[in-house]
Image (cartoon, coloured by chain):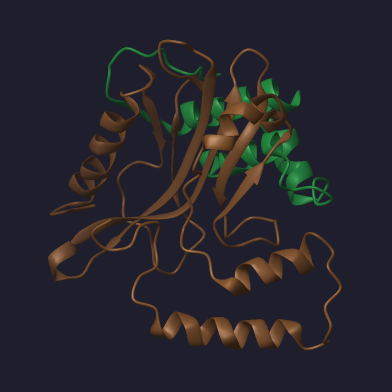
Chain colours: A brown, B green
């Protein structure tokens, strides 16, 4: 989101988020870090947005609850997106069963954290076991996934033993080639 | 000692530096049973590095910039 001032850019970022979460909760957002610009010399410095009373219990049936945190920076934008814009640099969305606080799933992206996993990812937690009926029909949104993403997952997280030692290089090279030619990334193809 | 301010509007709350730290402290106490300062010390010492993706740990860690 962009604005003529840093404050306007942040406001233009927050307004639609508050409107969006109002569909499922009356909780409000809390923001730490003010409206000042994020110095380019310190990429670690970021603002924080979260739900004030978290997790927020969702909907009229109050079966699920949501933890939400975003990190963002206020940076100078390009002409059509400026002179100031807000850039999201990390997020944490975790859905829990409200009554038990048991985690069900989490969409996370924390490239600056202590975890080795720096790409956006989806966690499935123990709570999915109690929701098997719902999950069979659920279409969990993701970004576009390459074949290489799945092959890497089988090796690094499900302990498939690769047939060649240079598997990391091979997968990086073939995925780079794919990404140079693909026509869309994101979670939805154009027009979908 | 600052406290987390009550919700009074349907917009958003701009936390002061003290309120931001209080929110971090509240969540660290609630989720992990430790103070914000104890969490910061443990996090920076790598005491959660065996499983930094634990959802309660990751959630509090995501709030760490509130202490800056």
Residue displayed at 52% across by 59% down: A44
Above or below — where is A19 with respect to A109?
above
Res B63 quadrant in image: top right
Residue A180, given in percent of the width and then of the height, sits at 42, 85
At 50% from the left edge and 87% from the top edge, which residue is drawn? A177
How far across and how far down the image is residue A74, in percent?
32, 55
Please state if B18 lies on the left or on the right of B60 as rendered.
Answer: left
In the picture, which quadrant includes the C terminus of chain A?
Answer: bottom left
| Closer to us: B38 or A157 | A157
State whether residue A55 appears in this view. no
Instruction: Determine whether, in the image, residue A86 is placed left or right of residue A39.
Output: left
Q: Is residue A51 above or below residue A118?
A: above
> Image quadrant of residue B26?
top right
Judging depth in this view, the residue of A23 and A1 nearest the camera is A23
Say left or right for B23 vs B50: left
Give left or right: position of A21 versus A172: left
Is residue A140 something that shows in the picture?
Answer: yes
Name above or below for residue A119 compared with residue A129. Answer: below
Question: Residue B21 sits in which quadrant?
Answer: top right
Identity of the residue drawn at 69% across and 25% down: B31
The answer to which of A35 and A150 lies nearer the viewer is A150
Residue that appears at 36% across and 23% down: A28
Q: What number of labels is visible?
A: 0
Residue A88 in picture, x, y percent from top left: 40, 54
């Amino acid at each position: 989101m962009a604005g003529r001032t840093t404050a306007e850019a942040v406001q233009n970022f927050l307004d639609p988020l508050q409107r969006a979460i109002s569909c499922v909760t009356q909780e409000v957002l809390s923001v730490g870090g003010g409206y000042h610009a994020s110095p380019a010399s310190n990429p670690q410095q970021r603002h924080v947005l979260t739900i004030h009373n978290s997790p927020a219990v969702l909907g009229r049936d109050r079966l699920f609850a949501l933890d939400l945190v975003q990190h963002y920076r206020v940076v100078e934008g390009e002409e059509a997106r400026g002179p100031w814009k807000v850039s999201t640099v990390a997020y944490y969305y975790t859905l829990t069963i409200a009554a038990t606080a048991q985690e069900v799933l989490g969409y996370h992206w924390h490239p600056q954290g202590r975890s080795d996993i720096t790409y956006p990812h989806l966690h499935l937690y123990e709570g999915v076991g109690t929701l098997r009926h719902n999950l069979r029909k659920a279409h969990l949104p993701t970004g576009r996934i390459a074949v290489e993403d799945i092959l890497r997952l089988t090796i690094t997280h499900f302990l498939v033993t690769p047939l060649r030692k240079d598997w990391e290089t091979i997968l990086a090279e073939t995925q780079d080639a794919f990404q140079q030619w693909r026509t869309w990334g994101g979670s939805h193809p154009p027009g979908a | 000692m600052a406290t987390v301010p009550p919700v009074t509007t349907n917009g958003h709350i701009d936390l002061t530096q003290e309120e931001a730290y209080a929110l971090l402290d509240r969540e660290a106490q609630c989720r992990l049973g430790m103070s914000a300062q104890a969490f910061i010390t443990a996090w920076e010492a790598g005491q959660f590095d065996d499983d930094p993706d634990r959802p309660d740990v990751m959630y509090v860690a995501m709030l760490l910039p509130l202490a800056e």
